[in-house]
Amino acid sequence: MKKLMMFVLCILLTGCAAPQAPGGSGSSSSPEGTASSAAQSQEPDASQSAPSGGSAPEEGSSQEEPEPETSAPSGSQSPSQSQAPQNEEQIIQELVSAMSVEEKVGQMFFVRCPETGGAEAAAQYKVGGYILFGRDFQDKTAQQVRDDIASYQAAAGIPLLIGADEEGGTVVRASSNPNLFPAREPSPQALYAQGGMEAILQDARQKSVTLLDLGVNVNFAPVADVSTDPADFIYDRSLGQDAQTTADYVAQVVEVMGQEQIGSVLKHFPGYGNNVDTHTGIAVDPRPYESFETSDFLPFQAGIQAGADAVLVSHNVVECMDPDLPASLSPAVHQVLREELGFEGVILTDDLAMDAVEAYAQDGSAAVLAVLAGNDMVLTTDFETQIPQVVAAVQDGTISQEQIDQSVTRVLAWKYELGLLGD
């Protein structure tokens, strides 16, 4: 009955269509059978019909006030334009009100796509998104990737965020397969050395178009960390330039991604610095707060002002903000991001499967700690275990319903801005 209610709501509210991947006649059609009712909708594909340069999200998911509907002067916004924010708010509120606790919590999980049974898992857990890794692209044709993603979307009900780490250089997923990209994506450093910012932006645009054609609607990029020392763990993934140059780079890449309507994720807040790899253990950052204010925060601030959709928080223990918890599990660090940097979009964790958080969740409740810290979405592999734990924490009052509703609203607003919901 609940599923039927959501289905009817989406029909009444102009449809929640998972858009076709743009950029090729070979793209598969919008999946049938979702709550979006894509097969029945006669509306144009949102991601394809959005004008170039338009619809870059405002700080991920901020809710705009509706334009006044009376005394509109001649030459002002058309009725459809002035009503768009109201329609967005109505769609999201109706969806949230129709969801069960389990469905709301599922939307807060951006999980590693299972190696098998991805469609079945999407249907069962109602996850908010799948992040794809090299194995999900390996040896496949573009059409096979599209078909895989279409099957996940068809099973999901509410359209999925489909993400990949396509940073370029040492971290690539789809472009490691020559069937999908003409060559492995070069690093930002290599592009900057070859042709400056122009080369980076041209590559960012083409990369976004190619990913969208495959059905990937979120690129976990750009890397906003400041690093100028080749000895740093994060150096090869960064621009390798000073804070201001990195800030300019991040802002311009985010703008290009917004123009192409692919989701952007700034990482790794509050700035990785010269810390060791948190995949393999705990990293403690002893730097004073001033160093973050004058350097590390600058690229994140620039990206937020440019309209970044999401910010990913690292597992580093940043002593000047919280000496006891990794940033990803620290309410204090999330407070800095919300209040000091003014970010209103989706905050998500780095992968909770990393060794750096294991010691802080000995009872296996890393996702509960992450939500309590202020994350809207949780990145993890073991979502089958973590989702029920978060559901139980909501049901027993450990996590408030109000907090869950706020996070789900931000997640759905991100999906709306990417053209996955509504018109």
Image (cartoon, grey):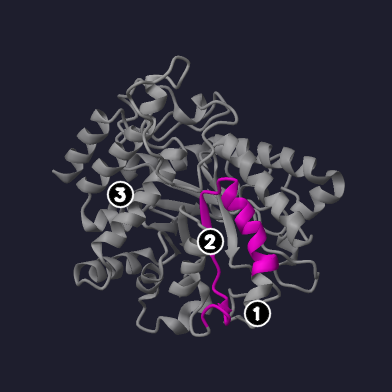
What amino acid type should be assigned to the residue bearing mark 2? Answer: Leu
User: Where, quadrant-wise, is the C terminus in this rendering?
Assistant: top left
Specify which label sits upstream in the sequence, 3 or 1. Answer: 3
Give the residue displayed 33% in from the left and 26% down from the top: 39
> Which residue has dot 2 on it?
312
Rounded to the nearest whole Å, what is the CA distance between mark 2 and mark 3?
A: 26 Å
The answer to whether 321 appears left or right of 129 in the picture is: right
Specify which label sits upstream in the sequence, 1 or 2. Answer: 1
The answer to whether 326 appears left or right of 302 in the picture is: left
Give the residue displayed 30% in from the left and 59% down from the top: 404
Label 3 with label 1: CB-CB less than 8 Å: no
The answer to whether 166 appears left or right of 148 in the picture is: right
Residue 381 falls in image quadrant: bottom left
Q: Is residue 353 visible?
A: no
Query: Viewer-nearest of labels 2 and 3?
Result: 2
Label 2: state its secondary structure.
strand
> Which residue has dot 3 on it?
123
Residue 124 picture location, percent across and down: 28, 53
Residue 220 picture location, percent across and down: 57, 53
Label 1 with label 2: CB-CB less than 8 Å: no
> Which residue has dot 1 on it?
288
- Report the span colored magenta: 293-322
